Image (cartoon, grey):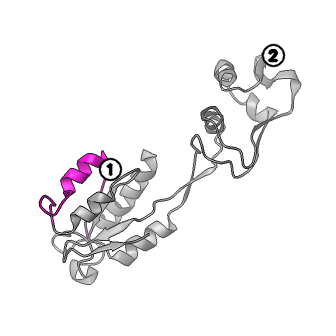
Amino acid sequence: RSNKFKAVRMHFRDADAKGGSSMEEDEGEGGGGGKGVPRSRIFLGKNKLLQLALGRSVEDEHSPGLRRVSKLTTGSVGLLATSRPRSEVVRYFASLADEDYARAGAVAPRTVTLSAEDVSNHPVSMVEQFRKLGMPVEVNNGRVVLVGGKKEYVACREGQSLSAETCKILTHFGVRLAEFRVRLVCRWSSRDGEFEMLQ
């Protein structure tokens, strides 16, 4: 999902480039704007390294209160350091939603049926790969077709737990069944060390 986070990075970078509110107008809700211009940066990496950088205890935390952020740095998370207003950040992520390819283990929200035409749009070189993924395909007159002249193939059914193979098939056919969202977990202010849970 690196491309998704790249879009988030670009949003804040572009907003910073345009200037925007000053630190005084922002009331210091974030970290270090510099010369009155809001600055933002997203950190993604190994959680243990992020935890060490923040500090895990009162004795080794980089700034007062960061140990609480460190404890929540688990799973698929990242850190956003910004001087932009809290309300603006919350509003942006609340509206951020994008279609994405499903991952193995996800539950199909709808039934997906691929037509013979969808299949024939792929090159013959894909036949072996489709077969390995469980699709009943063959080559007929130089075109990829469904075995037995079938008109359609059900890739998945609503409520079905998706396998890795099914997810690859859906990706090949450009079918996005998941939704990319970023959930805000907490907020810490460098101004006064205030910590706030956001979920």
Looking at the image, residue 92 sits to the left or right of residue 28; the answer is: right
Q: Which residues are magenta?
A: 38-63
Mark 2: amino acid? Asn
Measure the alpha-carbon separation of dots 1 and 2.
49 Å
Asked whether residue 191 is drawn in magenta, I would say no
Q: Residue at x 29, y 78 (%)?
A: 21
Q: Mark 1 — residue?
A: 44
Q: Position of residue 91 (x, y in %)?
A: 45, 73
Which secondary structure, mark 2?
loop
Mark 1: amino acid? Leu
Q: Residue at x 63, y 22 (%)?
A: 129
Instruction: Assess disc 2: are there few (<14), some (14-19) or many (≥20) residues with their C-alpha within 10 Å of its C-alpha.
Output: few
Q: Would you identify the image quadrant in which residue 191 lies?
A: bottom left
Q: Mark 2 — residue?
A: 141
Q: Would you identify the image quadrant in which residue 54 lies?
A: bottom left
**Residue 20 appears in view:** yes
Looking at the image, is mark 1 or mark 2 nearer the viewer? 1
Looking at the image, residue 81 sits to the left or right of residue 89; the answer is: left
